[in-house]
Image (spheres, rainbow, N blue to C red):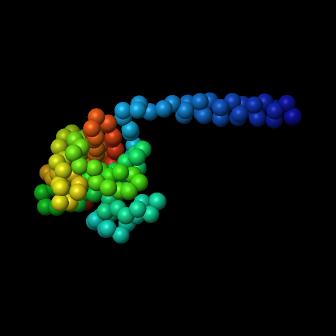
């Protein structure tokens, strides 16, 4: 009995070591890739905050390295208005001058690419997605900040 317990402990230890070894790789220094964020906002609410207490605009938030990425998807007649906030992670100051592209997969599987120009008065990037199909939309936001690639993956539902 002791022998089987000892062998079991060794197997568990080796498994944990293997899992730890798999997770130690460093990401490419020029591309910061985020995890997927799935909450769906219903409207912009400036009283929402991030886990560290910073204010948000009510969208889906992903912190990627030193960056704060936030997507607000607001349904409108004929489509969805996308507001994307690209900010520094610590002070939440807007980062103008980046190249921002949204790659959207519609519920029907159609792929669309949108350029999001910077809206200086609103201090964010924005575009209108012509889409009236109900269901889940998958959005990959690709940004280029002076040569540094920062990507975020989001989803939203259109009812």
**Left or right of 5 in this view: 22:** left
Q: Would you place residue 82 above or below residue 141 in this image?
A: below
**Relative depth, front residue between 7 and 91:** 91
Q: What is the total number of numbered labels drawn onto the structure image?
A: 0
**Relative depth, front residue between 159 and 112:** 112
Q: Would you place residue 108 above or below residue 75 in this image?
A: above
Residue at 28% x, 65% y: name it.
Answer: 44
Residue at 41% x, 31% y: name it.
Answer: 28
Q: Would you place residue 103 above or below residue 53 in this image?
A: above
Check the image and name the residue furthest to the bottom: 47
Q: Would you place residue 102 above or below residue 55 in this image?
A: above
Q: Position of residue 112 (x, y in %)?
A: 19, 41
Residue at 21% x, 51% y: name it.
Answer: 125
Q: Position of residue 158 (x, y in %)?
A: 25, 57
Residue 23: quarter of image = top right
Q: Position of residue 93 (x, y in %)?
A: 32, 55
Residue at 28% x, 40% y: name it.
Answer: 145
Quick check: can you spot residue 38?
no
């Amino acid at each position: 009995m002791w022998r089987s317990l000892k062998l079991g402990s060794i197997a568990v230890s080796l498994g944990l070591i293997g899992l730890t070894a798999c997770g130690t790789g460093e990401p490419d220094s020029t591309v910061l890739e985020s995890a997927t964020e799935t909450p769906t906002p219903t409207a912009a609410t400036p009283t929402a905050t991030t886990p560290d207490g910073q204010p948000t605009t009510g969208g889906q938030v992903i912190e990627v390295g030193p960056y704060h990425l936030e997507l607000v998807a607001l349904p409108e007649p004929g489509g969805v208005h996308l507001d994307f906030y690209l900010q520094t992670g610590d002070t939440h100051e807007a980062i103008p001058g980046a190249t921002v592209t949204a790659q959207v997969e519609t519920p029907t599987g159609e792929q669309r690419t949108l350029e999001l120009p910077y809206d200086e008065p609103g201090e964010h990037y924005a575009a209108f997605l012509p889409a009236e199909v109900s269901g889940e939309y998958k959005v990959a936001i690709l940004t280029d900040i002076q040569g540094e690639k920062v990507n975020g993956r989001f989803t939203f539902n259109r009812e």
